[in-house]
Structures are given as C-alpha cells and as structure tokens.
Image: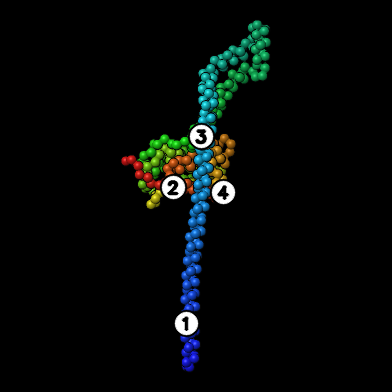
Amino acid sequence: MTEQNIDYRRAYQRERFARDELESLLEAQTRRLFEANTELQEKVDMLEKQKVLILKTEKMATLGTLAAGVAHEINNPLAYVSSNLESLFDFNESLVGLLTIANELVNDGSIDPKLRERLQKLQKPVSFQFMSEDIEDIGQDVQEGVRRIASIVSNLLSFSRPKESKSENVDLAQVLISILKLAASQLRSVAVTTDIKEVRKTYCNADALGQVILNLLLNAKDACESESSRPSQISIKLYDNEKNIVLKVTDNGIGMSEETVTRVFEPFFTTKAVGKGTGMGMAIVYGFIEEHDGQIEIDSKLGVGTEITVKLPVREGQS
C-alpha cells in the first residue's frame, strides 16, 4: 500500500469517526429535546387542568354566595307561610263544621228566605259540600309544597355556608356499611357488589360523608333505572393508598354526556324529570368533599354507565 493510500485511509477514518461522533451527539441532543418537549407538554397539560380547577372553584364559590343570599331571602317569607299554614290547620275542623252546617241550611226550606238566598250566592262558585270535602286535601298539598321549599332552602344553606365542625376519627368502611344497610330497601332493584378493604381512620365529619355516599348510591340507582335494556348493576369499592382513602361507585346506567359532566355540580342542575329531584344533591356532595380537602372525579359515557371516584386525604385529628 502506497503512502498516499495510507494517508487517504487515515483521513477517511478520521472523517468517518467525526461523522459517527456528530451523529451520536445529534441523536443525544434530539433525545434531550424530545424529553424536554414531553416534559413541557405535561406541564402545560397540568397548568390547563389547574386553570380549569381554579375556574371551577371560583364558580362554585360564587354560586355558593348567591345560593346563601337566595336561601336567606326565601327563608323569611317561608316562615310566615309556614306559621300561618299551621294556624289554618288549627282552624280546619271549625271551618269544615261551618261548611257542613251551611250546606245543611241552604237545603233547609224552613229557614229565612233572605238567609238562604245569601247562602246560595256564596256557594255559586263552589258548593259548600265540595269545599268541606276538598279543604283538607288542599291544605295537605300546600303543606307538602312548603315542606319541599324548606328542604330546598336547607340544602342551599348546607351547600353555601361553612359546616359546623362535628369531625372525629372515623372508619369510613363502617360508615359505608351503615349507609348500605340504610339504603338496602331503595337498592332492591339493583344488583350491588362491594369490595370494601380495611382502611385507616381519618379525621372527618362522618354524617357529611355518609350523606355523600348515600347521594352517590341513589344517583347510581336512578341512572340504572333509566337504562332498562340490561340488568341494573352497581359496584362499590373502598380502599386506601399511600395518600388517600378512595371510594369508587360504578353503575351501568344511562351515563352522562360531556356537557352534563361539566355541569353536574351546579346547584339546581338536574337531568331528572320535574318533581323527581331538586338538583342540589351533587352540589352538596361537592361542598362536603371540598370541605374535607378531597377530590371527586367523574368518568361517564352515554349508554355505558358512570364511575365516580372520591379521594379523601388521611387526616390526623384528636384521639
């Protein structure tokens, strides 16, 4: 091999080594850029989620303030209506008695003609007989209406105002078991399966979280009853991990659209028929979960079903 060929070969090897080194550096740089871009995208996604959560929290806070104002405005006239209604019920027996006597007199030919004429004029719109029979039913309907309004106002106040502290160290597994027993009669039409693990005690309001569980179960039952093409099923799981106690309630009901999921925690928003719900159940659930520094997530698909996940941090309180 000539000296010229040797020099050429050495130059070729140096150029090839430099090219391989450059490609290796380029590949490493590309990998770093890709990883940095992936990390950046994850941070952007996280910021977007936090932005949505902040907007949602602010919206719920505003709704809570409005709800409190509406509730207090309704409470005062409601007190007058309720009080006067009680008085009317006290008068009911006397009123029915008077109407019965008036009905007898209007058909009595022996009374003064002028008095009978006046009685006849009074019963022209509605007969005394009909009024005496209907007055009690009307009163009961009004009383039921007032009771429903009072319940809505109470729910509004529960949603909007700070809750009274009744917290203690609670075993949520026992709370769940108690609620399942309580709701057993209402869940007869649904096949309920449970997977309840032993969980750590956490400092919380047992009554409030019991109401959360009950609301989730009854909503799941209603969703199943709205989907009649398959047997109704509800699955309940309770377990804890390093940070949280986790409750999952899954149903194979009618499911929810994306729009419904975004609005489900709004006060008075409901997909139920008129008279079937006030639209406050999930708003109160959200308030209780937020009060306990927890999270609630909804995964739902129309025609398939819904899974609701509640995550509660394990908190240490008084012994």
Q: Position of residue 63 (x, y in %)?
A: 53, 39
**Mark sitting on residue 258:** 4
Q: Image quarter for residue 263?
A: top right
**Label 2 Cα neighbours within 10 Å, binned few <14 / some 14-19 / many ≥20:** many
Q: Residue furthest bottom?
A: 2
Q: Which residue is at 53% across, 21% downward? A: 84
**Residue of label 3:** 68
- Which tag, 4 or 2, sits closer to the chain's start? 4
Q: Alpha-carbon distance for marks 2 and 3?
A: 27 Å
Q: In the image, what residue type sits under mark 4?
A: Glu
Q: How many C-alpha atoms fall within 10 Å of the one at disc 4: few (<14), some, or many (≥20)? A: few
Pair 3/1: label in front: 1
Question: Is label 1 in a helix, a strand or a loop?
Answer: helix
Residue located at (62% from left, 14% from top): 103
Gap in angstroms between the C-alphas marked 3 and 4: 28 Å
* Residue to which mark 1 is pinned: 14
Label located before the other in sequence (3 or 1) = 1
